[in-house]
Amino acid sequence: MALKIGVLITGRGSNLQSLIDAAADPDFPAEIVTVISNRAEAYGLKRAARAGVHHEVISHRSFKTSDAFEDAIDEALERAGVELVCLAGFMRILSKAFITKWKNRIVNIHPSLLPSFKGLHVHERVIEAGARISGCSVHFVRAEMDAGPVIIQAAVPVLLEDTPETLAERVLHWEHRIYPQAVRYIAEGRVRITGETVRITGAEAPASGFMSPEK
Ligand code: GRF
């Protein structure tokens, strides 16, 4: 039976789209049972509607406290029978209590090679720092922001002529590949966490790396 996932979004939802597209394959071992956005204008809601996926808006502005907002999200996830929560550009910080409840059942995608460049405005900061290689990470969520055991990473070169936008685009291409792949591993029951290390049964790292500049 397919693993039931709930996707939390705030905006564009291109990572949501990559999960929708992956789940459209009958062989994909997970299904999206609900999409929750904290913003009514999120374009990702249109993507969910187009795909016929259940979706709802739970706005943080409708609640007096962030606890009440999180309780509403938690209830919606439970109601939908969610087994794995996927954060996909969800721009609210979740409390320790929420994350503890969903421990090892909540994952996130971040557009850097964690643990480097946590937080916002990643691509600007990568370029400013003069890094030659960047990338993206799918990781289990822990209480500290953008921390937690990494499941998959992908690396891309940072080009001298890059702007934050061009770098974001190059990284995003890989985000869309690694997020469905990480969900697949989890849904197939192949993922084991020991401390900070994730082991995936039958998955292999590539035999060689890549460097930038190349020559
Ligand atoms: C992505 O770059 C993701 O890594 C970050 O926020 C962005 C969301 O983009 N957490 P989208 O809404 O999935 O298009």
Image (tube, helix red, strand yellow):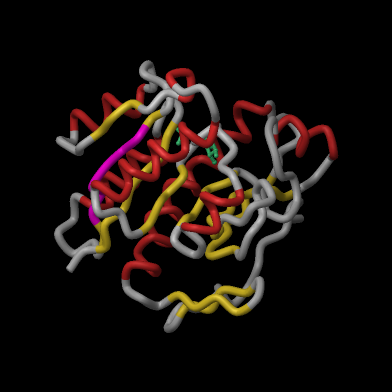
**Location of the N terminus (image quadrant):** bottom left
Q: Check if residue 191 falls in the magenta segment.
A: no
The residue nearer to you, when weighing 119 against 127, is 119
Q: Residue at x 65, y 49 (%)?
A: 146
Please give left or right for residue 129 compared with residue 207 in the image: right
Q: Is residue 205 above or below residue 184?
A: below
Snapshot quadrant of residue 75: top left
Q: Residue at x 50, y 49 (%)?
A: 174
Which stretch is magenta? 31-36
Q: Residue furthest right?
A: 129
- Point out residue 167 in the picture as x, y percentages from the top left corner: 63, 35
- Point out residue 185 in the picture as x, y percentages from the top left corner: 39, 69
The residue nearer to you, when weighing 86 against 83, is 83
Q: Is residue 172 above or below residue 4?
A: above
Please give left or right for residue 113 compared with residue 19 in the image: right
> What is the chief secondary structure element of the magenta stretch?
strand
**Location of the C terminus (image quadrant):** bottom right
Snapshot quadrant of residue 29: bottom left
- Point out residue 113 in the picture as x, y percentages from the top left corner: 67, 53
The residue nearer to you, when weighing 147 against 17, is 147
Please give left or right for residue 122 compared with residue 97 in the image: right
- Point out residue 86 in the picture as x, y percentages from the top left corner: 42, 49
Q: Is residue 178 above or below residue 90?
A: below
The residue nearer to you, when weighing 108 against 21, is 108
